[in-house]
Image: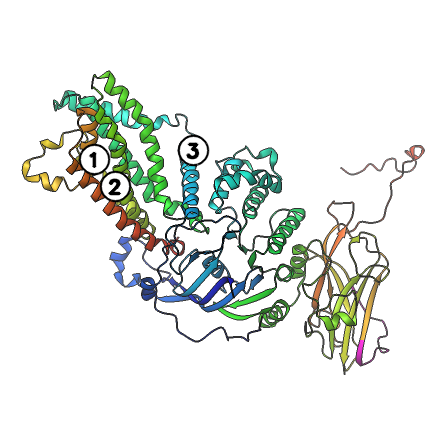
Amino acid sequence: MNAAIDVSNVSKSFRRYRPDRPMMLQEVLARGFRGLRTTEQFWALRDVSFSVPRGRAVGIIGTNGSGKSTLLRLVGGIGSVDSGRVRVNGRVGALLDLGSGLHGDLTGRENVIVAGVLNGLSRREVLRRFDAIVAFSEIEKFIDNPMRTYSSGMQMRLAFAINVHTNPDVLLIDEVLAVGDAAFQRKCLARIQEFKANGCSILLVSHGLAVVQRLCDEVLWMNNGRLMAHGPVNQVVRQYEAHVGYTMEPELVAEGAAAAPVTVNAPATPAPAAAAVAPGVPALPDDGGTPAEGMRIVAVGLLDGTGHALEEFRSGQPLQVAIDFETTGAASPPRFRVRVVREDGLVCCDLATDGIDMSRLPSTGRGRMVLMLDRLDLNSGRYGVDIVPYPEAAPHDGGAQAPGCPLTVIGDSVREAVLAVPHRWEFDAGAWDAGLAGREPTP
Amino acid sequence: MQFRAIGASGGNRAPRPRHQALVNAVRPAIIVGSMPPGAVATPLHSTERAPWFSLQRWAHVRDVLRELIARDVKLRYRGSYFGMAWTLLNPITELAVLYFIFGSVLPLSIPNYAAFLFTGLLVYTWFQSSLFSATVAVVSNRDLIRRPNVPLAVLPIISVASTLLHFLLSLPVLFALLLVTGVPITAAALTLPLLIGVQFVFILALAYPLAALHVWFRDTQYFLKVALQLLFFLTPVFYESKTIPEQFRYLYAINPMVGIVDGYRDVLVRGVVPPWQTWLTLLAVSTGLLLVSLAGFRRASRHFADEL
């Protein structure tokens, strides 16, 4: 197999010094030379092997300090391995430290050329792509100003634009997709997908599982410098979640929603079996989540007012939340709780089946619960819809949560508020001073 | 893609100890290049030996050099009022002071002393300022080191080359001084580019080990400062090398800057071409040093990213 990236038995260690290691000669003389010795070797990577075929996108997930970024750097040829071998076939493009190589005292134009050449393009290639780079970064007007006068968002946009205007055979991405506003992020994601479509192999490090699920074909799970698993996205992500005791907390829903701003609820690969159960409803992984005892949520989907899969949601439209579940001998009838959470974690509504007679539900079998919202007057923005099944015994905050669905609300108002209440303005000239007099608006 | 269970990530082979890895893992491909789209992909960097020569690679290195040198020159005096003039102000003030001391206070009675002195000063200034800037070339370019595709061996070259530009810009002033003080400019001056080339190679040969050493040992720049100050007196900048007593000549001539400065004087002030033995020695010494120090730098450069 002609792999784009081939990593075999790679180990890498860093030396760790004592915290009180003498740094200067006077300290060494005072305390003797013993403190100079390294105390321990810290293995950032241990015996890692994998390969990435051409045109595949592979995500690397893992907790902080698990060796993801070190691995990515080694693939980029930065740093040395202690043992093993890293082979990369083709030109490497990298979205690692975006701002590196840019200088604040140079103008945007000068920086584009220097950084483009540093990225492996020839000077002529950079000049040819110059207009495209500037257009992508959306800072045409400021391109001849020194970079230090740019806002940080502008700097990042320019840096990103330079870095994606190469034609790499292998693209390395490290947690840099959160650049700029939603529209720019969308553009970045689209650009990366374009790379992939053109046969570029991608190695992506991210904490946002939604991004990984959206972009990647396979996932590597790293833990403490070891490769724990390498396989299909959903399988490995599930293993990882089980390992870290991962539950979908509001912040994480928000992260997922933020990372996938356009599509409403579209996991990368729906499991075919579950999809057959509920057409139009994206499926959760087969044994996904760990909901309440005796009940399992198979799939969750957002539907529009007519029961069809939601394409885009406008503020004030009806929304249905469909929950396909399975009960296996539950002691008590299942109960459901649905929360709509804004991306910053604010709970906008929290609706439960409390007080509704659920005894009609079979104790063993399948079914779909649908929460009908006649209208949802949320302000435009990104939200997540959380499904929280819980057992009878713990009516509040009980039970594990199933992963939420991202929901992007499109509306006219962009002011800061939770609600976009249906309203209109009227003008009545004759009513002046008719009862409001004396009650001046407080400044 | 087959799914692999937890922990089954290859054999349980213990990684080799660090020192052995250092000996074995040869990665000469510090100079990583680009290739045109559609070309047959060859490994551009890997822990294995990459092809030593490829046109695209060198074309890329050339572009990187060009852009980074231009950046260095642009940034050096950006924001300062006198700008490029500083390149000249420095040796000119030194010239004024030394000319006063050794022309009037402690007269050395060297013919054409102003031209003699200025030649030495310019040559030594280039030597000194390029070594200062090359020593910190790696450390101060941390973000370039943490990027793929950047050939690290260019970093010291950039320092030496951008100071060379300043040296070249001050040459017209030197020629003006020669004319004003009535020193005839002869055909010997045509060998000047060769001399500059030799000096470039020699400076670079010192720049590589200094830049690499500074990564691990940050006192390098302070040592260098002291060393260059002392070397100023051990190089015939303001006196003639033939005034050195006979019994110290051999020891004195170990410093290659002696031969280089004398070479410039021969060519510019005395109007003679140095004998071929001198050229041969200078070339052989500088090139030999450069090859050794470049090899060392490449070896060391694999660890730069880890140390910075």
Q: Which mark is residue B260?
A: 1
Residue at 34 percent of width and 43 percent of height = B156
Pinpoint residue A201: horizontal percent, then vertical percent: 56, 58
Q: In which quadrant of the rendered view does residue B44 lie? A: bottom left
Please report whichever mark, 2 or 3, sits nearer to the chain's N-terminal start.
3
Name the residue carrying label 3. B74
Residue at image location 60% in from the left, 70% down from the top: A236
Residue A259 in the image: above or below residue B102: below
Q: Is residue A63 left or right of residue B243?
A: right
How far, Cα to Cα, is label 1 from label 2?
10 Å
Q: Nearer the viewer, residue A279 or A179?
A: A279
Residue to which mark 2 is pinned: B202
Q: Badges 2 and 3: C-beta atoms under 8 Å apart?
A: no
- Binning the other alpha carbons within 10 Å of mark 2 as few (below 14), some (14 to 19) or many (20 upward) gives many
Q: Nearer the viewer, mark 2 or mark 3?
A: 2
Outermost left residue: B247
Residue A41 in the image: x percent, y percent? Answer: 38, 66
Asked if the residues shown at circle 1 and circle 2 are in contact, with their CB atoms under 8 angstroms apart, the answer is yes
Q: Chain of mark 1?
A: B
Q: To which chain does the residue with label 3 belong?
A: B
Figure quadrant of residue B278: top left
Tell me which amino acid carries mark 3.
Lys
Q: CA distance from mark 1 to mark 3?
A: 29 Å
Q: Amino acid at mark 1?
A: Ile
Q: What's under tag 2, amino acid-wise?
A: Phe
Crowdedness near tag 3: few (<14), some (14–19) or many (≥20) residues, C-alpha within 10 Å: some
Is residue A350 part of the magenta span, yes or no?
Answer: no
